[in-house]
Image: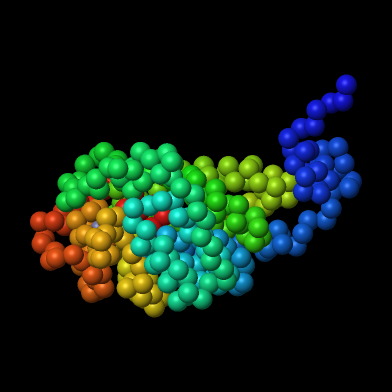
Amino acid sequence: MARPESTSWALSKLHGLADPVTDPDTVPAPSPLWFQPKITVSSHSMENTSQNTPATILLSGGLDSATVLAIAQSQGYECHCLTVDYGQRHRVELDAARRVAEALGVASHRTVTMDLRAIGGSALTDAIDVPKDREADDEVPVTYVPARNAVMLSLLLGLAEVVGAADLFIGANAVDYSGYPDCRPAFLEAFENMADLATVAGADKGVKFRVHAPLIDLTKAEIIRTGTDLGLDYGLTWSCYDPTPSNLACGHCDSCTLRHRGFEEAGIPDPTKYAGTLESPSLIVSRRNSSSADPQD
Ligand SMILES: [Zn+2]
């Protein structure tokens, strides 16, 4: 009886690759695509230059991810952006992502549709009210979308394989955030290790994936100053979780609160159009000691 093919062997056959275990001498020469010059930079750092090296960027249309894109471009990366239409309540951010990608002249921009409303469990994807004027506490709010960053980074990883990138950029932030676990450094580091095992590029061709989260230690005000210095127009971006029917920002959700306070602290005018007037009592989110209001943001 024939030995069942292993999954890896079956996959290599599927992709026309030699079996690295049984046919070590026939492994084709690695594509130059996968052997870009090693970038001497640790993950999550903002310091490196890598002219025309492809990178993938998770672009939500929010303030943070737009800043990350501007940073990656300033470092010389050829930026391939991915936006996920996951059925989010604030669908207006998808238009913002397109605006940002166009304005910054990215190498490519894709929108993947994957409707997480089938899972629900979040105020962003289910019939759950978005909390307003929320006091800071240690609880992860209901705007958390179950496993969202694990799902989205996996899509970004798939795109990285396709465009020959080893560098993935995400706007995760662990200072001014809502406490989402998938914005924390431990998750990002674990994903980086997983990526090397989960892909043909990593497992069979020796690519070491890097997850860059250049905003991880920045306050919202620092993020805004960084993007402003890079010439980013934040009027293109969108943060509010719960826009009005006429697509004004609510001014009261966590994301609005963090955004507006960030502009105030940065001493930079907030270009956002809010519904009604912003009263200071409605902007009371205190800095958490442990995530971005929108991890993809
Ligand atoms: Zn809002």
- 229 left or right of 264? right
**Residue most toward the top?**
1
- 9 left or right of 270? right
Question: Which residue lies at the image location 57% right of the left edge and 43% below the top edge?
Answer: 193
**Residue 108 visible in the displayed image:** yes
Question: Which residue lies at the image location 37% right of the left edge and 58% below the top edge?
Answer: 91
Q: How many labels does the image show?
A: 0
Question: Which residue lies at the image location 63% right of the left edge and 43% below the top edge?
Answer: 198
**Residue most toward the front?**
245
Question: Which residue lies at the image location 63% right of the left edge and 46% below the top edge?
Answer: 196
- Observer-nearest of 175 and 63: 63
Residue 140 at x, y = what percent?
Answer: 29, 40
**Residue 214 visible in the displayed image:** no
Q: In which quarter of the image is residue 222?
A: bottom left
Q: Quadrant of residue 269?
A: bottom left
- 122 left or right of 214? left
Q: Quadrant of ligand 1?
A: bottom left
> From what the image shows, is residue 184 above or below residue 241?
above
- Observer-nearest of 116 and 37: 116
Residue 187 at x, y = what percent?
Answer: 46, 43
Q: Quadrant of residue 297?
A: bottom left
Q: Quadrant of the N terminus?
A: top right
- 198 left or right of 156? right
Task: Identify the coloring.
Answer: rainbow
Residue 90 at x, y = what percent?
Answer: 33, 57
Residue 70 at x, y = what percent?
Answer: 45, 70
- Observer-nearest of 281 and 240: 240
